[in-house]
Image (cartoon, helix red, strand yellow):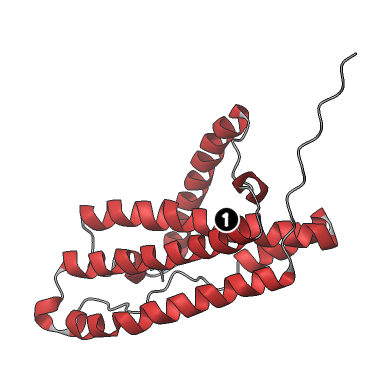
Amino acid sequence: MTTAPEPPPESPALRGRDLLLILIIVLAAISLIALLAVPLVGVLESPEGRGPTLVVGTQLLLLAAQTIVLIGAVYLVAVRWRGLRWTDLGLRPAPRRWYRRAIWITALMLALAGGINLLTQLFMAEAPVNPQFSLVAPAGFSWFALLGMLFVVGLFIPFAEELLFRGVLYGWLRQRLGVPAAAVLSAAGRSGPPSRSTPCSTPSA
């Protein structure tokens, strides 16, 4: 006579104080990064310190440091302290069909965004300027800036934000409010004011 295997034990749920602790750690660490970055502002504002590589490299370093802080806070509180698994935070492989769909959806969205930009230019006297361009390319275009920002802004930061909003916040809200309300509230938090600012953002002259 065989017995059915026991279901895996449920992971402990996050509490409100856990989210508050994550927030405190992130704010404290980013404030420390800002204080340490203050000397860099004077260097970047000086004429001899405005080399494109230095500006972009500093920007990438600060963005990466803030992102590492966010991931580290989630790891320390949710994984190490509360004992959650990474799969509990949404880090699990998706079915293959979703990878194929992601490629088609991305291509469609890029084409749609390009079409909207073209229509905007047709109806405006001048071409629209992306307000985030000074952040993504503060020293103008370069391959170093393109590749670096593609990795940090296009991959690293979105991963950290999804881990926080979809993995931590959505999971916490879902346990208390249900799936529909949790999806709406976590999406509203994710679509708020952009957090991709750095302690020293110095546009080039």
Q: Residue furthest left?
A: 48
Q: Splitting the image into 4 quarters, where does residue 204 fall? A: bottom left
Give the residue at x 57% y 55%: 162
Write the residue at 29% across / 85% down. 38
The amino acid marked with disc number 1 is Glu
Which part of the image, by quadrant, shows the C terminus?
bottom left
Considering depth in this image, is 10 or 62 the residue closer to the camera?
Answer: 10
Instruction: Indicate the quadrant where residue 20 lies.
Output: bottom right
**For this view, does 6 lie left or right of residue 51?**
right
Which residue lies at the image location 43% right of the left edge and 60% below the top edge? Answer: 122
Residue 128 appears in the rendering: no
- In the image: residue 173, left or right of residue 148: right
Q: Residue 178: x and y, percent?
A: 84, 57
Count of marks overlaid on the render: 1
Expressed as whole percent of the image width and height from the top left, the position of residue 151 reads 36, 51
In the drawing, does residue 192 fall left or right of residue 118? right
> Which percent across, then down, holds residue 62?
34, 69
Q: Position of residue 95 (x, y in %)?
A: 63, 30
SS at badge 1:
helix
Q: Vertical placement of 114 versus 95: above or below? A: below
In this view, which residue lies farthest toward the right? 1
Q: Residues within 10 Å of mark 1 (few under 14, many from 20)?
A: some
- Residue to which mark 1 is pinned: 162
Foreground of the two, 100 or 111: 100
Residue in view at x 20 percent, y 79 percent: 44
| Residue situated in front as seen by the camera: 12 or 26 | 12
